[in-house]
Amino acid sequence: MDRLLDKVAVITGAAGSIGAATARLMVAEGARVVVSDVDAGALDALADELGADRAVAVAADVTDGEEVRAVVAAATERFGGLDVAFANAGIFGAVAPVAGYPDDVFDRVMAVNVRGAFLMAKHALGVMRDGGSVILNSSVVGLTSDPGICAYATSKHALVGLMRTAAKEVAPRGIRVNTLHPGPVDNAFQHSIETVATGRDEAAAAAAFEAMIPLGRHARPEEIAAAVVFLASDESAFLTGATVPVDGGMSI
């Protein structure tokens, strides 16, 4: 397993299930990783699991430009360069109609999901080696939407515009930029969204969401990680500017 042999990656939101699964798979495929999150305890545990020779943890708030710069700098200082950036940190917000959506919640969602991805792309692209890959983690609702989720859906749609702009800017260097659009994933983040959105208990809410997915189930975090590794690897060397759904057919 050497699809990422000698590549260096940074991953934000690494303490969550998708980020951690991606870090594990990247290391298994030969990469060295800088993992970042606001949850320093979970982050340190992940780095310890991966091994000091393969991973370094840098706690950071993705809305803070200097902290994001420090995450990127850790890749170049510890591992000698940067080939892959996975902007994965994100929050959901609230469920409310546009006319009643709380201003402060909207602003916070945009700060984490959009500004955070922008800062990662900005600082990563400044040092990334030619032929690298930037992956912005959007959502199925970055391709669709539903009532009550204006902040989350707006932020995830915004990543597509950021991606398409950056993809054209860095194509001459062979750097690829794509957005990933996961559907519902079997993790605590998704289950909390489902219970709030439906007002049902976790099992009933999950069943309601699975009824909307053609493949009839939630994704495993490892399945999303596999898509990230594909986009990070040379297997996707001619893929840029793309919105890549990994949603069980939910966006059809």
Image (cartoon, helix red, strand yellow):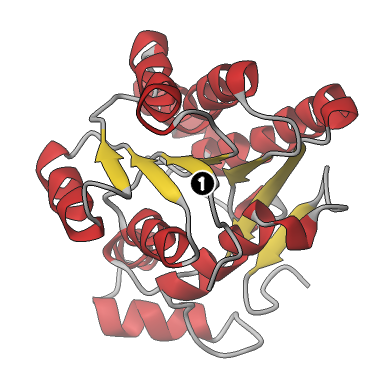
Q: Left or right: where does residue 65 sit relative to residue 149?
A: left
Towards the viewer: 134 or 211: 134
Residue 221 location (% of width, % of height) = 42, 70
Can residue 94 be seen here? no
Which image quarter: residue 17? bottom left
Residue 161 versus residue 107 in the image, above or below: below
Quadrant location, the C terminus:
bottom right
Q: Secondary structure at mark 1?
A: loop
Q: What residue occupies the far top of the structure in this picture?
A: 66
Can residue 243 be seen here? yes
Q: How many marks?
A: 1
Q: What residue occupies the far left of the structure in this picture?
A: 41
Residue 142 location (% of width, % of height) = 66, 48
Q: Left or right: where does residue 190 sit relative to residue 129?
A: left
Q: Left or right: where does residue 203 sit relative to residue 87?
A: left
Q: Which residue is mark 1?
A: 149
**What amino acid is labelled 1 in the image?**
Ile
Which image quarter: residue 171? top right
Residue 84 versus residue 103 in the image, above or below: below
Residue 71 versus residue 174 in the image, above or below: above
Which image quarter: residue 2? bottom right
Residue 49 location (% of width, % of height) = 18, 60
Residue located 47% across and 80% down the image: 218
Residue located 55% across and 69% down the image: 226
Residue 41 location (% of width, % of height) = 9, 43
Towards the viewer: 133 or 76: 76
Residue located 30% across and 46% down the image: 55
Q: Residues within 10 Å of mark 1 (few under 14, many from 20)?
A: many
Towards the viewer: 78 or 237: 78
Q: Left or right: where does residue 223 sit relative to residue 186?
A: right
